[in-house]
Image (cartoon, rainbow, N blue to C red):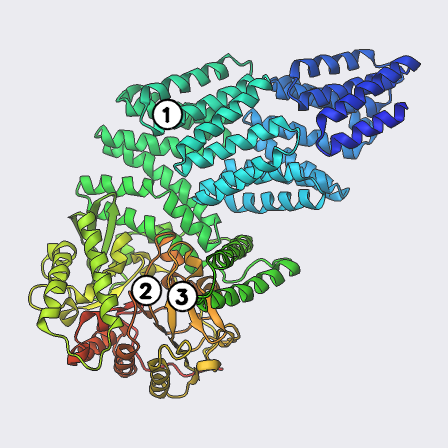
Amino acid sequence: MLEAEWSLGNVTMSTGQATRGLNHYLRARTLAEMIGDRLSQARLTCNIGARLAQLGCYSEARAAIEESRAMLPDETPLAVRIGIEQHYGVVLDTMGEGTAALEAYARAAALARRDGAKLRLIEILCNTAFVHQQLGDLTLAHQTYHEALAMAHQHQQNLTAARILMNLGELAVAQGRLSEAGVMLRQAVEGFRRQDDPGNAALAQSHLSRLFRILGLTGEAVAVSREAVTALEQTDWKEEQALALMELLRSQHQDGLLSAATASADAALALWEALENPLRCAEVIGERAALALERRRYDQALADARAALDYFTASAEPRPLWAAPARLTEARALHARGEHPAARRAYLALISDSEAIGDHWTLQAALSGLGWLEYRDGQSTVAVRHLTRAAANLEMVRRTLTVEELKARFLQHHNDVYDALVSLAAASGDATAALTAMLRARGGGLLDMLQVERTYRTLPSDEYAELETLRRQLALMRANLERVTSHTSTAAMTRQQQHLRASEARLLDLLRQRQHRGEVPDLTSLLTPSEVAAHLPPDAALLEYYQVQDRLWGVLLRPDGTCDLRLLGTWTTREHDLLADLDLICSSTVAEPIAPRATLPSDLAALHARLHHLWKLLLAPWGPLPPRLFLTPHGPLGSVPFAALWDGRGYVGETHTIAMLPSGSVLVAPRQASAPIGPPLVLGYSDGGRLPATQREAREVGHLLGEGQVFTEEEASSTVLRSLTAPPAVLHIAAHAALRHDAPLFSMVRLSDGDMALETWYDLPLHGTRLVVLSACDTGQVADQGGPLLAFQGALLGAGVRTMVCSLWMTSDVAAEALMPTFYRAWVGGAAPAEALRLAQQEVRSRPELAHPALWASFICCGAGALSEGGPIPQASV
């Protein structure tokens, strides 16, 4: 009976049923007492203590384990003593007595080494590392975890290895090693699932949600943490439930779901109170303070933050990682209340302490907060020093992110530091410093992408197969959605869309696991106006735009390195509405039949008024401009047709050659050696006859390019591109395309075998391709999420292309058919790509039926070679 009850206790505990397990242990201990088995009685008392701790009864748990230690007979085996000391350490740590816990673990480790108990030693090392982590000794925690992980792998302790990976992932997040953290946490989740441990898998997922928050993937963070809470609610693991609830409330807070975050905070606090854990209660109160600050209830925020900090101060041992959010909220609340000296002291103390323990994100937030405070106090020099340190911290993390989507979302989420640096420089009239900050803000990530090796870590074969299967399935699902008819029920269409989104989410998850090999070099030294100016043609200039909130700045950089800074004005709802009107006018014009009508002056009057307003805002402030311009739009300016802006006498494109760049940094990117090149490649697909002119365009372009390959209709497939063994000298695609603002990596170009999503374009072998032309709708647009890194421009630059032609809005296949032959004749004849496009637009504009800007101004030329690299076409070398 004793053995049966004991075994039942072990089994029910292993499945997360702590209450049932405890009852079995209690009955077993009674049986041990009845037969006088003192050793079994001690061991079961220890088990009871451990389970009481899991149920949150910490005082009773401690008493039980201390009773167990006292009743051990002299002949107790070492293995039993090891287990009891280990459980004692766990309870002491949970009660906030970290130093005493470390002493218990040290005793357990010494006994384990004496006994040669390698497996128990691994667990003890894990526990020891965790306490070091909570006490703020992150370096020692990292070393101890890795020692334990090596032993776990050696002895094939897969469940323990998963626990270590989970803790190492959490630690890596705190230290700013985000790519490493992502790999570890995903391995932990999969490890727990393989071992049929859903509770710990859910806990690892909650740690993953913090990583998502820092990367700016807020929606994913909320979903993952909510899923973790739901899974843990199916167990008796109250402490883990409370931890997951805290991650959920932080994710909800960041996503602006303040009421939901408050409810999660209340639920977490109730659990910690029931678990008698005052330090964790204080941590939740600190999160409540942050929510009050978000609602601008500064007095309440300060009071709650200080109430939380009183708990931490009264504690026998510091928990710096737990206290950091409350300390940061205290500093921010003082700042918001205008108590700047007190806020400054609070920020400086946080900076010192977080730097000492390696808490990367508290350091980042404190540097940024102090920088803004000094800025508003007029201490520009001090503010720049703090903000520059914050920017350097971000750049260090950014360089470790080698997945384009994660890098782009991270940059968007943490751009406030660069906004402050630009504002500071602009306020002091320092054009060079302002442009330097703009280049670092928008150019660092692009330089990373242009320098990274375009090969990936090998996915496991099953995941690689799943990746390719998902791509094929998504292409089929999109095709099916395109064929929806009036007879398709709303419910059926909703199911198809939900299935599509779920498959896209899984594909994104797999893509995030494909890290580039090798380290990205630090090229920050290249992001200076003097370096960029050295790459400008003699009669050209760079015009870099930058928007901070509603203020729009611009810097004009000339080849001699001189900079001219202008505050262009405010970007208001009027300008947003104006761009929306332009898009509507252009789209409706393109949709009309072309042949029967000519563009009348009355058609252009309202359009010219809008284009003139944009000219006055964006170009007129500098007076006469050089004849050739690199323009780097920011935010909504990405959809402005600069060549069509109206100066009152004519279009800008009549007198200026314009090339677009995602950032001036593209000009200074070191050029990588190109592979042997293949012949020009032309693809034309009419999308089932909806774009009939694409076939004629493809054939005409192929003829002009000479010895090239032309594929039309069914032959124009993504397989042609994916099977490339050498970069084509020129790549021209005439087809339908669509931009996905909600998920830019799934923007696509439609070919005969389905939609070729943007996520596949980064890997195309195009190093050495002189020119890519995407004669398709919206391929020059930048989605709201992700910026230029997650756009066709960014993907093609990353694939190795120097220059590309793409479009800002829905294109007319008839207009494209008229424009492209002229463009290629000029380019093959030696004109730079942007100049060839200007000449082609001029010729198309001279035809009455194509004179409307909607029909010729949609195409833009992008890239570092746009103003200088004309024909002839390079000869194929393979």
Instruction: Kindly indicate whether the residue at mark 1 contacts the one at mark 2 (C-beta within 8 angstroms).
Output: no
Around disc 3, counting alpha carbons within 10 Å, would you say few (fewer than 14), some (14 to 19), or many (20 or more)? many
Q: Which mark is residue 292?
A: 1
**Residue 265 position (above or below residue 513):** above
- The residue most toward the right is 35
Viewer-closest of 359 and 254 = 254
In terms of sequence position, does the residue under pointer 2 or pointer 1 come before the other? 1
Give the secondary structure at mark 2.
loop
Residue at label 2? Answer: 780
Around disc 1, counting alpha carbons within 10 Å, would you say few (fewer than 14), some (14 to 19), or many (20 or more)? many
What residue do we see at 59% from left, 30% from top?
241
**CA–CA distance in space, label 2 to label 1:** 42 Å
Residue 484, position as x, y percentages in the image? 45, 66
**CA–CA distance in space, label 3 to label 1:** 45 Å
The amino acid type of the residue labelled 2 equals Gly
What residue do we see at 25% from left, 43% from top?
549
Residue 47, position as x, y percentages in the image? 77, 22
Q: Which mark is residue 796?
A: 3
Residue 455, position as x, y percentages in the image? 53, 62
Query: Number of numbered discs present?
Result: 3
455 with respect to 405 (left or right):
right
Give the secondary structure at mark 3.
helix
543 with respect to 451 (left or right):
left
Viewer-closest of 423 and 238 = 238
Viewer-closest of 88 and 8 = 8
Around disc 2, counting alpha carbons within 10 Å, would you say few (fewer than 14), some (14 to 19), or many (20 or more)? many
